[in-house]
Image (cartoon, helix red, strand yellow):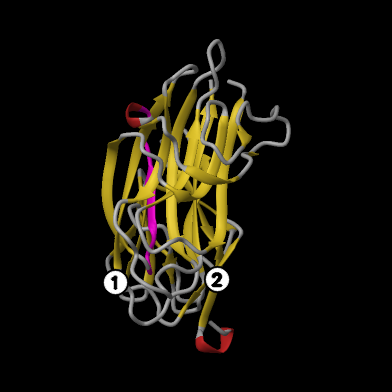
């Protein structure tokens, strides 16, 4: 399939993921493997754990510096759930709130 | 612990049938054990007609699947190479992917699940759930599709893998 057929292109674990639509609301990693947000960015877990058993969160294969137990996509916002509670990725794409 | 290793592949076209995606068989004893910590599968390019797919983690005794040889990658540069080497036979001490024949050996299902191909499937095992395969085991550990994906494009662009530590 040609790239022109896809609006959303991201990366996870070294693989380019192409999608025509963003992920539907309430999809959660795990058991899902990836979430595609409205920017086309691909979210998934890395392979590092912290002392709370949380896993590092990757956005397009770049470590966000955040650890979580679950990543959820709901109404256009990526939310991280972990020992510290819930954090949401800001609309500016710069912070977790 | 000797290290942590990944058997991963992407852009794979699978057959439209029952197919083993990854298969790892522990080496003969005495040697270190394999502790499987993570499995994942997803489709890197999808069409609007997304579909649901079943997946299973299993052990399989001989006869093993006929595979495409794939060598494990170490996750830490400082680690030694894996005791597992790539091979097509699924024999002890070897690994491979994307089977062309499933082999007659009985599969024992450890974990069964289903997923939407658009979202993929990730299994991160908690410490209590880690799947351990001792050196000298008579079976290998595989991840397979127990049912066919359906015709192309459902068979195209699969990315999958597993991670284990050698302890």
Q: Which residue is mark 1?
A: A25
Q: Which residue does the image show at 39% across and 51% down from the upper left?
A: B122
Q: Quadrant of residue A72?
A: bottom left
Mark 2 vs 1, N-terminal side: 2
From what the image shows, is residue A93 above or below residue B36? Answer: below
Q: How far from the left and from the top, in percent, is residue A88? A: 39, 64
Task: Let me know if residue B126 appears in the view.
Answer: no
Q: Which residue is mark 2?
A: A10
Image check: B52 left or right of B133? Answer: left
Q: Which residue does the image show at 33% across and 31% down from the upper left?
A: B129
Image check: A26 left or right of B103? Answer: left
Q: Which residue does the image show at 56% across and 49% down from the upper left?
A: B8
Q: How far from the left and from the top, in percent, is residue B49? A: 33, 80
Q: Chain of mark 1?
A: A
Q: Chain of mark 2?
A: A
Q: How far from the left and from the top, in percent, is residue B60? A: 37, 33
Q: Nearer the viewer, residue B46 or A88?
A: B46
Q: Which residues are magenta?
A: B118-127
Of badges 2 and 1, the one in the foreground is 2
**Disc 2 to disc 1, C-alpha distance:** 18 Å
Q: Can you name the residue that lies furthest to the right here?
A: B78
The secondary structure type at the circle numbered 1 is loop
Q: Which residue does the image show at 40% across and 41% down from the upper left?
A: B103
Q: Can you name the residue that lies furthest to the top here?
A: B30
């Amino acid at each position: 399939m040609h790239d022109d057929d896809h609006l959303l292109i991201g990366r996870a674990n070294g693989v380019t993921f192409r999608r025509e639509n963003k992920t539907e609301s309430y999809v959660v990693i795990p058991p899902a493997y990836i979430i595609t947000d409205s920017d086309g960015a691909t979210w998934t877990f890395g392979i590092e754990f912290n002392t709370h058993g949380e896993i590092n969160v990757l956005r397009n294969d770049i470590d966000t510096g955040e650890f979580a137990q679950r990543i959820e996509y709901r109404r256009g916002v990526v939310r991280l759930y972990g020992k510290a509670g819930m954090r949401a990725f800001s609309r500016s794409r710069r912070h977790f709130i | 612990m000797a290290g942590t290793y990944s058997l991963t592949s992407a852009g794979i076209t699978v057959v439209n049938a029952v197919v083993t995606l990854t298969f790892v068989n522990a080496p003969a004893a005495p040697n270190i054990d394999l502790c499987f910590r993570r499995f994942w599968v997803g489709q890197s390019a999808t069409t609007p007609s997304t579909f649901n797919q079943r997946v299973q983690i299993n052990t399989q005794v001989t006869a093993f699947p006929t595979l495409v040889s794939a060598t494990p990658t170490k996750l830490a540069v400082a680690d030694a190479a894996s005791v597992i080497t790539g091979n097509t036979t699924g024999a002890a001490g070897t690994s491979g992917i994307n089977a062309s024949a499933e082999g007659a050996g009985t599969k024992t299902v450890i974990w069964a699940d289903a997923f939407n191909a658009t979202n993929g499937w990730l299994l991160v095992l908690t410490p209590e759930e880690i799947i351990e395969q001792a050196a000298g085991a008579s079976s290998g550990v595989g991840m397979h599709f127990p049912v066919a994906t359906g015709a192309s494009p459902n068979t195209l662009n699969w990315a999958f893998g597993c991670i284990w530590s050698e302890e």
